[in-house]
Amino acid sequence: MADPKPTRTRDTEPEAFVEPTWCIHNQALLQQVHPSDWVNPEPAERYHLVVVGAGTAGLVSAAGAAGLGARVALVERRLMGGDCLNYGCVPSKAIIRPARAWHGARRVAEDFSGPEVAGEGDFYAVMERMRRLRAEISRHDSAQRFSDLGIDVFIGEGRFVASDAVEVDSRRLRFRRAIIATGARPFIPPIPGCDEGCYLTNETIFNLTELPTRLGVIGAGPIGCELSQSFARFGSRVTLFDMAPHVLVREDADAAQIVQQSMLRDGIDLELGVEVLRVDNTPAGKVIHFEKEGETLETTVDELLVAVGRTPNADGIGLEAAGVEFNQQGVIVNDRLQTSNKKIFAVGDVASAYKFTHTADALARIAIQNSLFFFRAKASDLVVPWCTYTSPEIAHVGMYEKDAREKGFEVDKLTIPLADVDRAVLDGADEGFLRLYIQKGKDRILGATLVAEHAGDILGELSLAVTAGVGLNAISGVIHAYPTQAEVIKKAADTWRRGKLTPTAKKVFALFFRLFS
């Protein structure tokens, strides 16, 4: 039976989605990731590894070490699964997909001569589906599962109390090695009037049960753009604010421009190059005052999402007592992920500029090697891909042109429009391109940017090429299924190869064919 619809539209506490009695799915989630009847075990005399934080980095660290036979303790004060399961990848992608479907249904008549679609969708049902799926997936990150792996799981506040000890609820966990994997939390800029309870973050927006008529979003990075576009497609009037001149400033400007135009077509009001001055919480809504080109303007919204970045969770866990250095960017580590205390390593969002689930996983594997054995794996050896799940998506791996030149590489750029790819044209999804950054005079791919509806799924081949040093010559010899959008990679390789045919070579071939005609 479906949960009865509540009267409130959101909860005010960061973890409040686990509180309401009306949501059976949230109750099921909580029972997996923070069970109320959990009894912490008696600590072992000494652990090979104590992991503080049970997000992706912590879970991979603990499971990997335990699988190798180490005696492991895992400490989590909030929700196992961390951001990815509870506030990030899982819930966000569970609403991005229906938002795309709603948009496609409205466009089907114009784009594909399909039936006219009328009426409103059920936003409450979308959010309920998200909560149900999140609860189902949560068993993979559950306290019981990791206990069954032979790990001592401690639910509670963990603090370092010595260079070789963590304390949880008066229980002392002594260790030979430790890994800090406490993650990060939303950064809230010091905007007057933007007080707790006035705004949503990625930790609370998934508590909504009613679609905001008017939604304001501060921050045009990946989170802000993904959620702005999704809520606009559900039917919210979205206004997106950022100080930058365009969305997704980390990406190439022309790649970001394609996404920006798509957002404008979705009806999003973009207020870019602006400074938000203050927020007034009034009975009519939240009044956002901002400065644009020297003029002070205002707009009123029903809900306000703040998505301007992340703050590492390095404070309040006793790092001073452990002799671990940290700053505003997080725990300070060397290339082998060691902290200033050589017994303690740090991984994931608390210690990395790349705040992605897959990066946390990869860093955890390095930390296991370096903390428990004599390997010397380096974080700098990683090639990190990422994707922003807008429509179209922007995916990237390796270096940008600027990065490559700063590292001393001479760079050739090769750009293949999706309009040259038959499947993209047939799908009506030919807005985008593949751009390769190639070492001049060689076939080595230094980096790649792909703008396409399924860019994240296509990127894997390019990630392998950059990581393993597979050059364009080799890719050109690979048969790609036709017609697929991934054929854009083959087209890029063939285009590069044709460019190697110099005028001199052409003359030689012409002479050869005249002689043997």
Image: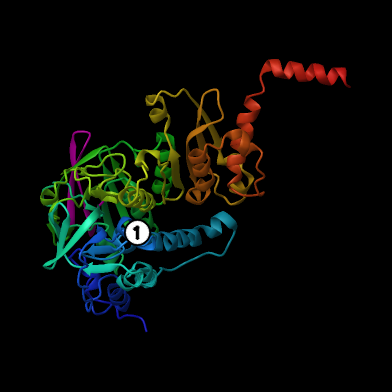
Asked whether 296 falls inside the magenta stretch, the response is yes
x 10%, y 51%: residue: 321
Of residue 486 and residue 349, the one placed in the foreground of this image is: 349
The way the protein has been coloured in the rendering is rainbow
Rendering coords of residue 419 (x, y %): 58, 41
- The residue at 29%/48% (across/down) is 240
In front: 39, or 192? 39
Q: Can residue 13 be spotted in the picture?
A: yes
The answer to whether residue 208 is seen in the rendering is: no
Query: Where in the figure is residue 66, as x and y percent of width and height?
Result: 35, 62
Taking depth in this image into account, of 91 and 480 the one nearest to the observer is 480
Horizontal side of 95 relative to 208 (left or right) equals right
**Residue at image mark 1:** 65
> Horizontal placement of 80 versus 424: left or right?
left
Q: Which residues are magenta?
A: 286-307
Q: Of residues 24 and 58, which is closer to you in this image?
A: 58
Place of residue 232 in the rendered image (x, y in percent of width and height, measured from the top left): 36, 56
Give the residue drawn at x 45%, y 58%. 100
Main secondary-structure element of the magenta-colored stretch: strand
Specify whether 397 is left or right of 508.
left
Is 75 placed left or right of 234 in the picture? left
Seen at 62% across and 32% down, the residue is 495
Callout 1: helix, strand or loop?
Answer: helix
User: Could you classify mark 1 by the number of other residues whose Cα lies within 10 Å: few (under 14), some (14-19), or many (20 or more)?
Assistant: many
Amino acid type of the residue tagged 1 in the rendering = Ala
The quadrant of the rendering that contains the N terminus is bottom left
